[in-house]
Image (cartoon, rainbow, N blue to C red):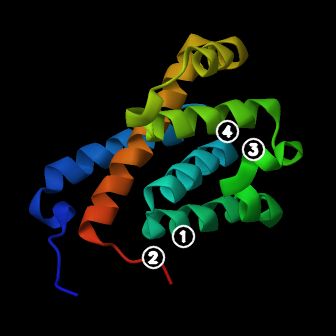
Amino acid sequence: MTKRLIIKDLIPELYQTMLQLSEFVAESGINKLHQELIKIRASQINGCAFCMSKHTVEALKYGEDPKRLYILSAWKEATDYFSAEEQVILKLTEEITLIADYGLSNRTYDEAVRLFGEEMTAKLIVAIVNINALNRFSVSQRLHPLT
């Protein structure tokens, strides 16, 4: 495989901006396990092995049940494993990650605002947009998963 450019080396100020956004998300008040579910699910959809690996390790550190991670990509078939709030977070994640397909539906948006309020819904959207941007950086640079 040919070597790809490393954006953080070429444009360090952009990398710092992305880190600041990630730090904002980390300190946003979103439950740490919910943050990791967002990151893993978006990374699964985007085919980002680097981020799937990294955030699965992080989720386990935060106490995530490995059984839930095994079935995360098929969560709609195993809703008993995920709370109502987590199901809305996963719907938000999928609809925003696959935004070109149908966009964020009114139903999912309304459910999120009802459960989380406007400010937390906004923070969830930022968290999803952030990991999608990071996935695109990682996949385009062909970053390898952590070993």
Q: Residue at x 17, y 75 (%)?
A: 4
Q: Is residue 17 left or right of residue 135?
A: left
Question: Which SS class for mark 1?
Answer: helix
- Coordinates of residue 11 in the picture (x, y in percent): 12, 56
Query: Which residue type carries mark 1?
Result: Ser
Examine the rendering and report whether any part of residue 91 can be seen: yes
Residue receiving disc 4? 31
Q: Of the residues under marks 3 and 1, which one precedes in the sequence?
A: 1
Query: Which residue type carries mark 4?
Result: Asn
Q: Of the residues under marks 1 and 2, which one precedes in the sequence?
A: 1
Q: Which of 41 and 9 is in front in this view?
A: 41
Sort mark 2 into few (<14), some (14-19) or many (20+) by Cα contacts within 10 Å. few
Q: Nearer the viewer, residue 77 or 48?
A: 77
Q: Residue at x 18, y 69 (%)?
A: 6
Cα–Cα span, label 3 and label 1: 22 Å
Q: Of the residues under marks 1 and 4, which one precedes in the sequence?
A: 4
Residue receiving disc 1? 53
Cα–Cα span, label 1 and label 2: 6 Å
Cα–Cα span, label 4 and label 2: 25 Å
Cα–Cα span, label 4 and label 3: 21 Å
- Coordinates of residue 62 in the picture (x, y in percent): 71, 57
Cα–Cα span, label 2 and label 3: 26 Å
**Which is in the foreground here, disc 4 or disc 2?**
2
Q: Is residue 113 above or below residue 85?
A: above
Q: Is residue 139 above or below residue 130?
A: below
